[in-house]
Amino acid sequence: MIHTTAGEIGHLFVIISFVTALMSTVAYLRISLAGNELLQNKREITQWRWLARGSFYLHGVAIFGIVASLFYIISNHYFEYHYAWNYSSRALPAEYIISSFWHGQEGSFLLWLFWNVILGIVLIQTNRDDRAKSTSSRQWEAPMMTVFALVQAFLASMILGVVFGGTFKIGSSPFMLLRDVLTDTPIFISNPNYVPEDGKGMNPLLQNYWMVIHPPTLFLGYATTLIPFAFCIAGLWKNEPKEWMRPALPWALFSAMVLGVGILMGGYWAYETLNFGGYWNWDPVENSVLVPWMVLIAGIHAMLIAKKSSTGLKTAIILSVATFLLILYSTFLTRSGILGNASVHSFTDLGLSGQLLIYMMAFVVMAAVLISVKWKLIEKDEEETSVYSREFWLFIGAVILCLAGFQVLNTTSFPVYNKIGESLGFSPNIAMPADQVAHYNKFQVWFFSAIALLTGIGQYIWWRKIGKGNLNAIITSGIITMFISGGLIAFGDITKPAFMVLLTASVFAIVANSAILWGIIRGNYRLSGGAVAHIGVALMLIGILFSAGYSKIVSLNNTGMLISKGEDFTKNDNKENKENVILWLNQPQKMSGYLLTYRGQRIEIRDVPEYVPRDWVEPIEGAGPELSFHGIALRDIEQNGKLYHKKGDTVALHPENTYYEVEYREPGGKVFTLFPRGQINQQMGSGGFLPSPDIRRMPGKDLYTYVATVPDPSSEGTWSPTETYRIAPKDTFFVNDYVAIFDNVVQTREVDGTPLGPNDAAVKAVIRVLDKEREYTLQPAFIIKDRMVGRQAETNEELGLRIQLNEIDPRTGLFTFTANTTQRDYIVMKAKEMPLINFLWIGTFVLVIGFSMAAIRRYREFTKMRDAKKPSLVTSSR
């Protein structure tokens, strides 16, 4: 049965959200354009406000209705809907069912709409025109919410899913039925009411707890960039080019905090999940989000100097507008399909590229025209800015941030340049750098060295600790910096000049801002947000420098054995063959001070806290959707004295995941175990094997381990042709390149723990197999039970060997054995040490604290001024 009601309700809510957003835009626009006559007519203006607010609140109800409808469809496994079928499955646990909501483009737009509604309601309540005590500079609600509601209308149009004339399409609806999307699929031609039993499921790489919280955080950051933009447009619109910054500044700080955290969450997800060995790969999609954040930070600093500098005010206006426009540009890049060949993160084009382009260009034109018309309102500075002034150094810092962002944006936009050229009739064919990481690092290391240096100098000048003829404080900090950075350079064996400069600048930023912070705390700790944030940035730079620039490969292959002849291993002078080691099952191997042993494959049972050996559970193959990713326990499953499942129970497994247990033994005898993960999914390419690392976290470094290659899962269980041996006790023979000794035969009264009957008999042959460092014993059994002959082979996975006792000849005293061999279980593993990476995560935490302190302080200033009788301009204290 097709459940059409939920989709119809959801689609109705989409239409309502679009219409109400337009109604709210028109009503707020009417108020904003009102003349004195309408403003004096309180009854009529009240009606327009009621309509504007009511429409926006109804728009919010509609957005919540869309969210509820889509969640209802996904959680109830209504796979007749394309969105539910394409991004979820019955096997997904609850947290991934939730995150499948924003897996697709439509869901991500809906998440953006959701956050904008929340923020819009908060802004209405905190900036209500009818509560203002002044009609001159306090009535932000109408012009600001005009912009806000117009953005919501554009976003709602992205999920509208309305087609005109069979060809013209507005938006892509998340409530499309599968049969309406896959129209040419034969099953729907013969049976239009066909409903799949299960969905395709989620991309295995996204099955990570960080992907449950990272997208909502990132899209909250996207949403918050609209607020400074809306206030800026409102300020220019009202001919008040400076006053908009007071309500906008706390939101800009909050936006910088949330967007920065969202970006770093994505980096941490990559660090824990992907196998490129780090947290940032300068991927175009990563860059497209980083650049708006950098411009936003520059804009915040420009706002701080805007009171005394027209240059700062102009810069603040341009950067506040540019931040939101760059978010729109990022959306266009990632969702238009233009980065399809340049990034592994970008979405495919759903036919929305033209609509996205119109969305972006509409606000570009609106902002450019308004700024051009109102530019003359900004008064020029009476005096030139002194090099010893606070405004000068903040402006220089903002400029360098923008230059750093432009360098990233320019290279990231190469595919866009190519598309523009093709549309104009020529092909620029600008290629992305062969080594993108080296290309970006070459420039960014110098930009951020300058930024770190300026955070220290700027703080001294801001708090008037130094000035013309008074440089004592900065000289003292410089001397302390030289001692500390010199020690770190020697300890870390840093030889590259660029890295020396970056480390020294970062240490100076910590020393200088700590000195300022100590002085501020003794006075008023609420003023210390800037210093705390700068210390956080410096700590992050040190963590990035050491972890990325001085990581150490632990898994050096000193055997001379060529592990693989594949392109991925032989390129770059056989780099991967030199930096990967092969570990055979239960065969210890020394590696960079560790003794490593691969202990076998493990799987994850959903209600069992620790991993279990793979051979403890028999997967249920070909079962219906209710038993998808389930198995039968082949033994009692017990951990830490607690019995979780008995032999024969059906257990639920986490899909597609295999963990490879690697035991590390340190020289002192301490043992720890890592479980790097492999995901088997033929749809994802790479031979169907997707590795993810496991990380040993230590105070001074991380040990980062992942499995690069494993035996082909599809060939598992393939045995060689049978070989036969006819031998006597004490004979020696060769099997699978091993020396084997048939010691003797012993009687046994039980087989597999089951006692034999009084008329039954059984013997076991004792065969020793000699490996390089170990000796293994195999005991195949020959059984006579109920006058029937049985044979029980014994298999040793470490040797890849199976031996069976087939016949006993009492006349000759000879025994006939058969043997089969298979691929021994192994992994190809890579491990590296990431020194001081904890500085990056600690710095992130400190940065969040600094932004939070600054945002709270600025919001208190805004509310105090909002509730005062007379408005005033932005204060000069930082």
Image (spheres, rainbow, N blue to C red):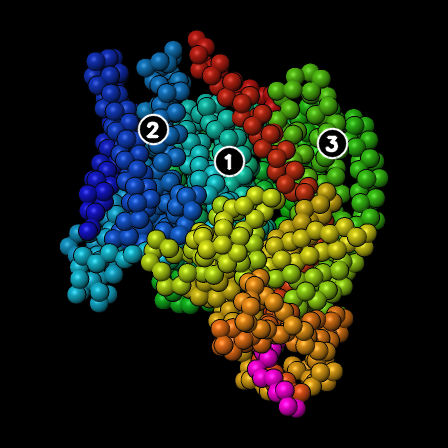
Q: Residue furthest front?
A: 758
Amino acid type, mark 3 = Ala
Q: Residue at x 61, y 44 (%)?
A: 640
Whether residue 766 is visible, yes or no, is yes
The local crowd at label 3, few if under 14, some if 14 to 19, many if 20 or more residues have their Cα within 10 Å, is many
The reply, left or right, for residue 235 in relation to residue 635 is left
The reply, left or right, for residue 816 in relation to residue 476 is left
Q: Position of residue 171 (x, y in %)?
A: 27, 49
Q: Residue at x 25, y 29 (%)?
A: 58
Residue 811 painted magenta: yes
Q: Residue at x 69, y 71 (%)?
A: 777
Q: Position of residue 757 (x, y in %)?
A: 54, 67
In the picture, the disc for residue 877 is none
Q: Nearer the viewer, mark 2 or mark 1?
A: 1
Sooner in the amino-acid sequence: mark 3 or mark 2: 2
The local crowd at label 1, few if under 14, some if 14 to 19, many if 20 or more residues have their Cα within 10 Å, is many
> Separation of disc 2 and disc 1 at Cα?
22 Å
Sooner in the amino-acid sequence: mark 2 or mark 1: 2
Q: Which residue is mark 2?
A: 145
Mark 2 secondary-structure assignment: helix
**In the rendered image of this protein, does residue 294 appear above or below residue 417?**
above
Magenta residues, dominant SS class:
strand
Amino acid type, mark 2 = Met
> Separation of disc 1 and disc 3 at Cα?
26 Å
Stretch in magenta: 801-812
Closer to the camera, 609 or 645?
645
Q: Which residue is mark 1?
A: 258
Amino acid type, mark 1 = Val
Mark 1 secondary-structure assignment: helix
Report the quarter where the C terminus lies.
top right
Closer to the camera, 754 or 108?
754
Q: Which residue is mark 3?
A: 512
